[in-house]
Amino acid sequence: MEPIDQELEEGELELPSQPMTLNLGPSHPAMHGTIRIVVELSGENIMNADVQIGYLHRGFEKMCERGSYSQVFPYVDRCNYASPMLNNVGFALAVEKLLDITVPDRCQYYRVILGELARIADHLTCNGAMAMELGAFTPLLWFMKGREMIYDIMEEETGARLTHSFGRVGGMAQPPSANFKAMVSAVIPRIRSILGEAEALLLQNRIFMDRLQGVGKISQADAIALGWTGPCLRSTGVAYDVRKAHPYLCYDRFDFDVPVGQEGDNWDRFMVRLEELRQSARIIEQALEQMPDSGPINVDDPRIVLPPKNEVYTTIEGTIQHFKIVMEGIKVPAGEAYGYTEGGNGELGFYIVSDGSGTPYRVRIRPPCFAITQALGGLITGLMIPDVVPTFGSLNMIGGECDH
Amino acid sequence: MSQKVVDILKEKFGSVVLETKSEHKDETVVVEASAWFEVAQFLRDDPRCDMQQMVDLCGVDFPDREPRFEVVMHLHSFRLKHRLRLKARVGDRDGEEATIKSVVPIWSGANWFERETYDLMGIEFDGHPDLRRILLYPEFEGHPLRKDYPANKIQPLVPFREGYEKLPPFDEFEGMSFGRQVFRSGKFD
């Protein structure tokens, strides 16, 4: 049989010299999240990249202007769906800042523990997905096993595995369940052992190291100017963590470290997240120890917190109070506040403008991965197509949060 | 946040600083829109302020006020651990002439935030390198975060794009054309 190219003329076989445009996404098997990257290629090298987001835009900020403050919680759940509890707590803290209230001690610990569990779930997902996209499927499954344990706790506590809507202004929806502490303290050692197992698979793996080390580098100055926060900024060596720099809740009572990287490449971002998992576990263990077993969860203010159900059904005060909060919403005094917490990806800010009514005048979410994703185009320029996958994975763009 | 930075700004810029306030431990400085860029530049470069990072930039719509929009920027200094909210007011009642200078030359991270504010609030940023819609599609009419944009408004379906950007399949002279040439030449059977 004749080879097929024998009939071709020489001229037809010349490789084209013009750049080639290629669309990665919006739906791409190696990308979690819908994002479109239009790349201009010269051979396999990326000459130019245009990152286009917005495929998951749902008008979060517009929707918030239509309901009461409590009705925002389901929306923030769907912003960073890898760690919804952190968003819940972040938004609750921002409104509480406007109201000038502080939740009781027990609730603070409860929020810290649930939030750190959510952070563990977030980082496990990110690191697992990153390994999976590079062909290492086993660590993902092991990480998912750990995440499943956390989801089980969340389900037990909140009734929902993913979108909890559990935060409330001035407290939480429910007090901790009876065996909350036992559940969490049983899970933490198991997550630690999963981490050790997955590390043993990945950290000595030549392929994994070569695909990550030295790829997608960013300098410290660039990362700061671009508005990076969270694990991605820390991978460049800036030890900035909102929990340490501007402690909220009771984070100043825990002993934990802020891991930093040196190079700011994919490997460092991966390693920072890996170490943060351990630090989160440390925080949880200390919080479990310090958390009081009894005491109020919600602030004692009938204008903010819903009364217990038996009071609603049996007393006129309870009925009225319930009615007022549900129908009119929590009356937040006019003013503005910017509440910021450490979310899964970095500084999660809520800028809330209130006009004194029960409906927020303006809710602005400052999604950490919005600022991080805008660097993606610059990061992958000059790299090759296969490098897009780990670089994009290590930024941990969460579509819901990035696109509001 | 820091009262000190507010005092420095007042001393340095004087009448350009229209209003300052401090509530819920956040300091706010309202400056004239014309001085927006200079104040931002000063805040980053002055060692006493040292605002290394622009954390957030957004717009707030007050349809009853003149100027109508507030451009709100949150700044943060890692080194001095302070924050500041900087505001400027732009635009008339109809939402026209809402233009302010872009701060992208100062903080490159402002790029997407300004695009988003332009997209959703309709505030234009003068000197922005690439001001186009970011979260919504190019054919979208209006700016949804304005208060006079009805939340239940439905936009018409986008007709099939004629002058679309380059999408595969490529033109004859682009990309890996040799394969197609063989196919088109009819020699491939």
Image: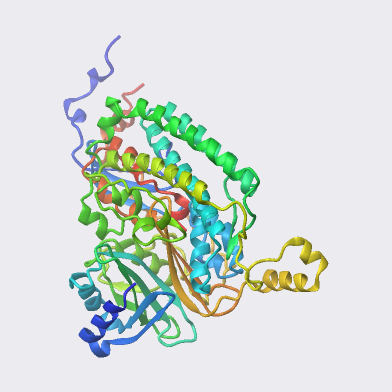
At horizontal 52% and vertical 54% (from top left) the residue drawn is: A109
Q: How is the image coloured?
A: rainbow
Q: Nearer the viewer, residue A253 or B57?
A: A253
Relative vertical location of residue A179 with respect to residue A338 in this rendering, above or below: above
| Residue B164 appears in the picture as rendered | yes
At horizontal 28% and vertical 18% (from top left) the residue drawn is: A4
Relative to A384, A175 lies left or right = right
Relative to A161, B93 lies left or right = left
Relative vertical location of residue B172 with respect to residue A358 in this rendering, above or below: above
Relative vertical location of residue A92 with respect to residue A22 in this rendering, above or below: below
Image spot of residue A224 (x, y percent) = 26, 58
The N terminus of chain A sits in image quarter: top left
Q: Nearer the viewer, residue A126 or A35?
A: A126
Q: Nearer the viewer, residue A324 or B60?
A: A324
Q: Nearer the viewer, residue A246 or A19?
A: A246
Relative vertical location of residue B90 with respect to residue A264 in this rendering, above or below: below
Image spot of residue A183 (x, y percent) = 58, 39
Q: How many marks?
A: 0
Relative to B127, A52 lies left or right = right
At horizontal 43% and vertical 83% (from top left) the residue drawn is: B68
Image spot of residue A339 (x, y percent) = 44, 66
| Residue A81 appears in the picture as rendered | no
Image spot of residue B113 (x, y percent) = 35, 64
